[in-house]
Amino acid sequence: MNSSPPGAPSAPGGGLPWWRDGLRFECTQCGNCCSGPPGAVWFTHDEGVAMAAALGMPLESFMQAFARHIHDRWSLTERAGPRGMDCVLLDRESQPGKALCRVYAARPKQCRTWPFWQRNLVSRDAWARAAESTPCPGMNGGTFFPAESIVKRLLDERQSEEGAKW
């Protein structure tokens, strides 16, 4: 019988995942998770509305300035940065030494769930690789996230990808 938390991926052969005792993470505002190779930051219609409101602009203007349509989904655009491509909403200027999200309180679920993404949680090695390759100085330190909280973020990550289809 699988005793994993509801919705949690189970370990090979069933049972609890390796992170069953929880993990630690604290955002250090380094911006590394918001930059790197070209990619996509998916967002839902409601998230687009919230981000536009956070910037004090109409949704249509927000979409023209900060979004791109990829197949049947919407993503934030990117711009060249010191580590490759930065999210268009990443602010490296206003606070020297920090990389801040211009819509942090309204950021999409894809961003809210970092680093608790399925691909980072499949094994301890995958978690360690993500911490090193991103690099993410906040992984393994700071706030404790129990397994139940991690499961919620995993489910939110799945929902964000599905919900990005408008």
Image: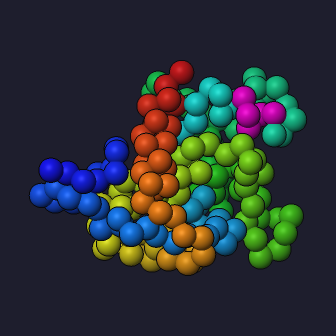
Q: Residue at x 62, y 26 (%)?
A: 45
Q: Residue at x 83, y 40 (%)?
A: 55
Asked whether residue 64 appears in the rendered view, the answer is no
Q: Residue at x 65, y 34 (%)?
A: 47
Could you tell me residue 156's position as x and y percent? 49, 42
Residue 20 colored magenta?
Answer: no
Q: What stretch is highlighted in magenta?
A: 49-53
Is 92 left, or right, of 81 in this rendering?
right
Could you tell me residue 129's position as x and y percent? 38, 73
Is 29 left, or right, of 162 in this rendering?
right
In this view of the protein, which residue sits in the foreground, 35 or 17? 17
Q: Is residue 141 above or below residue 62?
A: below
Q: Residue at x 82, y 26 (%)?
A: 58
Q: In this view, does 102 lie above or below 17?
A: above
Which quadrant of the figure has residue 25? bottom right
Which quadrant of the figure has residue 144? bottom right
Q: In this view, does 6 lie above or below 13?
A: above
In this view of the protein, which residue sits in the foreground, 72 or 113? 113
Rendered-image quadrant of the C terminus: top right
In this view of the protein, which residue sits in the foreground, 143 or 110? 143
Per the picture, the main secondary structure of the magenta-coloured stretch is helix
Could you tell me residue 52's position as x and y percent? 77, 34
Colour treatment of the image = rainbow
